[in-house]
Image (cartoon, rainbow, N blue to C red):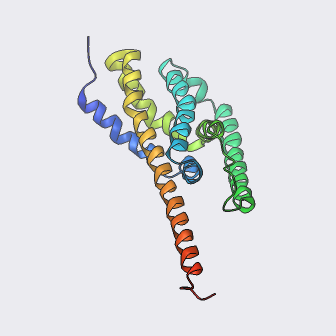
Amino acid sequence: MATLPLGFLAKVILISASGALSPGPLTVAVATLGFKRGYKGGIVASLGHTLAEFPLVLCLALGLSTVINDLRTKLVVSLVGGSSLIAFGILQFLDAIKSAPNSVNSLSNGSSLVIGFTLTLFNPFFLIWWLSIGLSLVTEAIMLMQLVGVLVLYLAHVWLDYFWLTLVAYLASLGKRSTKISKLGAQYLLSRGAIPC
């Protein structure tokens, strides 16, 4: 049985980094989730991302790129995607205004999943990446090992998404901890009269 060359896997990882590690709406949303939910918010959002991304990769592999490349399809996805990103931004802004510092976390793991799915599926840049750069990788994987090659390609790609989004969420959660520590320290100093009011 043929195997994918290590050079191809290295290329997939390097090229995938251009999409996975680039800042975008999902990265910003995951930072917010991480601040509220910790690293788990990143893991669950990554799962939502996978639920949107993997079917697209399969469609590309099965030759449905002609449907996806249709101008009307691109227009609909762009309009829906742009509207979704604007709506999400407004909701995040309103949530930030309404939320008190000690309020109970309003985001559940379910909403982390929905955020990961929605911000992936309706992100025009995500679709452009897969319809251009990603499609060439899928084509090469098929030529090397057919659908098994596509599965290996996807696994070599998606771990970066999980790594990056989980790291972003974890680092955001550290900011929450340091904010709590700073507040506790200030309260302690105030209670001891060390800071004049």
In the foreground, 174 or 196 = 196
- For the point 74% across and 57% down, the residue is 94
In the rendered image, the quadrant that contains the N terminus is: top left
Question: Residue drawn 61% across and 42% down?
Answer: 119
> Residue 181, percent across and down?
51, 66
Question: In terms of image quadrants, where is residue 191?
Answer: bottom right
Q: In which quarter of the image is the C terminus?
A: bottom right
Whether residue 130 is situated above or below residue 171 in the rendered picture: above
Q: In this view, does 75 lie to the left or right of 38?
A: right
Would residue 9 be visible to someone looking at this image?
Answer: yes
Q: Give the total of numbered labels.
A: 0
Q: Quadrant of residue 184?
A: bottom right
Q: Can residue 22 be seen in this view?
A: no
Q: In which quarter of the image is residue 19?
A: top left
Residue 86 appears left or right of 169: right
In depth, the one of 166 and 87 nearer the eye is 166
Of 110 and 139, nearer the camera is 110
Please state the horizontal and vertical placement of residue 34, each as a whole percent of the image. Answer: 54, 50
Residue 174 drawn above or below residue 75 = below
Percent coordinates x, y for residue 82 in the rendering: 67, 46
Across and down, in percent, residue 188 comes to 55, 75
Vertical arrangement, residue 95 with respect to residue 39, above or below:
below
In this view, the residue in front, 27 or 98, is 98
Residue occupying image coordinates x 51% and y 60%: 177
The residue at the far front in this view is 192
